[in-house]
Image (cartoon, helix red, strand yellow):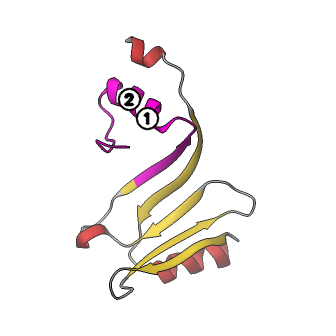
């Protein structure tokens, strides 16, 4: 075990779990109408509002699901966004561990 794995994490919460869905409207209907989730965000963006960021969550939950179309037409893909009180410190700790796919800059 390295010193990096012995370092206490500052991660405190799962903020958002992002994954690709083929049809955002169908996914929205499933999560809200079938599972009772709330819409936490539904925003269009891009030069011509061609992109959409859609988040849902169970009532009272801090964690959210982002229902995104596949990036660049590629199928699949997912990410987990976590919350921390020390972004730079946690980034350094995770980078030192190795074997974790994180962005080069926090």
Q: Is residue 83 magenta?
A: yes
The location of residue 68, given as percent across then percent down, is: 42, 70
Secondary element at image label 2:
helix
Residue at point 38%, 43% (across, down) = 106
Residue found at the far right of this picture: 60
Above-or-below relation of 4 to 9? above
Between 61 and 8, which is closer to the camera in this rendering?
8
Q: Assess disc 2: are there few (<14), some (14-19) or many (≥20) residues with their C-alpha within 10 Å of its C-alpha.
A: some
The location of residue 46, given as percent across then percent down, is: 35, 80
Q: Is residue 19 magenta?
A: no
Residue at point 32%, 62% (across, down) = 76
Above-or-below relation of 76 to 11? below
Where residue 73 sits, quadrant-wise, is bottom left
Would you say the residues marked 2 and 1 are in contact, meaning their CB atoms lie under 8 Å apart? yes
Where residue 94 sits, quadrant-wise, is top left
Q: Which residue is mark 1?
A: 88
Q: Which residues are magenta?
A: 79-106
The location of residue 93, given as percent across then percent down, is: 41, 26
Q: Which residue is mark 2?
A: 92
């Amino acid at each position: 075990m390295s010193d990096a794995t012995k370092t206490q994490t500052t991660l405190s919460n799962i903020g958002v779990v992002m994954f690709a869905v083929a049809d955002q409207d169908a996914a929205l209907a499933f999560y809200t109408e079938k599972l009772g989730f709330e819409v936490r965000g539904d925003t269009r963006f891009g030069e011509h509002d061609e992109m959409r960021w859609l988040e849902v969550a169970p009532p009272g939950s801090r964690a959210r699901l982002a229902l995104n179309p596949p990036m660049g037409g590629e199928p699949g893909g997912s990410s987990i966004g976590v919350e921390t009180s020390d972004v730079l410190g946690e980034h350094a700790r995770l980078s030192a561990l190795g074997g974790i796919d994180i962005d080069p800059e926090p």
